[in-house]
Image (cartoon, rainbow, N blue to C red):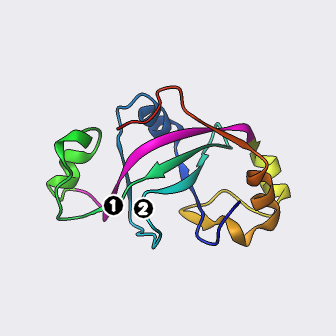
Amino acid sequence: MISESDVLFSIQPRYMRMILNRDKLIEFRNTYWKVSYPSLFYVYESKPVSKIKYSIVLGEPYSLGELIPIKYESYGTKNFNNQNTLRKFAYPILQVNLITPDISLNEMRDSGATPPQNYLYISRFKKLSKLLTGRNMSIFEQGKLF
């Protein structure tokens, strides 16, 4: 069931591939979501994929100025640790789930939602909430990242 705080955000396909290949273990954002961590977030994979295909479990974020531990060293962590980034928060990616069947751009639009430029709260879109509630989520084949 979708809660008031469930978030959908966009990730470009190249970064999603890096996450799936474990080359990117941190999600960098300018937003701090006031939820209890670890927390589940839904992912819209942007063009050319244009689908809600994944959900990811994010851990408590590191703020710019804090050091990301070595166990998360991957794409972008050195820049974040050196404060050479425009992003304010670094969220450890703890788990990736595959949503089946995925939700196409047309289904999303029919539900009244559009792909988020940054993020959106799913609960504000009742039809989208219902679509997501009816989907299966299985841990991506690699299992838990940590």
- Which residue sits at x=72%, y=72%? 124
Q: Is residue 131 above or below residue 53?
A: below
Q: Which quadrant would residue 66 be assigned to in this image?
A: bottom left
- Of label 2 and label 1, which has the lower sequence position? 2
- Which residue sits at x=52%, y=43%? 12
108 inside magenta stretch: no
Q: Is residue 68 above or below residue 51?
A: below
**Three-letter amino acid code of the residue under disc 2:** Tyr
Q: Position of residue 16 (x, y in %)?
A: 49, 38
Q: Is residue 48 visible?
A: yes
Callout 2: helix, strand or loop?
loop
Give the number of the mark in front: 2 or 1.
2
Q: Is residue 79 left or right of residue 36?
A: left
Q: CA distance from mark 2 to mark 1?
A: 9 Å
Q: Position of residue 78 (x, y in %)?
A: 18, 46
Q: Which mark is residue 61?
A: 1
Residues in magenta? 85-102
Q: How many marks?
A: 2
Farthest residue in the left direction? 82
Q: 10 Å neighbourhood of mark 2: few (<14), some, or many (≥20)?
A: few
Q: Position of residue 68 (x, y in %)?
A: 21, 52
**Three-letter amino acid code of the residue under disc 1:** Pro
Q: Is residue 70 left or right of residue 18?
A: left
| Magenta stretch, overall SS | strand
Q: Which residue is mark 2?
A: 37
Q: Which quadrant would residue 1 be assigned to in this image?
A: bottom right
Q: Where, quadrant-wise, is the C terminus in this rendering?
A: top left
Q: Which quadrant would residue 85 be assigned to in this image?
A: bottom left
Q: 10 Å neighbourhood of mark 1: few (<14), some, or many (≥20)?
A: many
Of residues 135 and 78, the one drawn nearer to the viewer in this rendering: 135
Q: Is residue 87 visible?
A: no
Q: Is residue 40 left or right of residue 125?
A: left
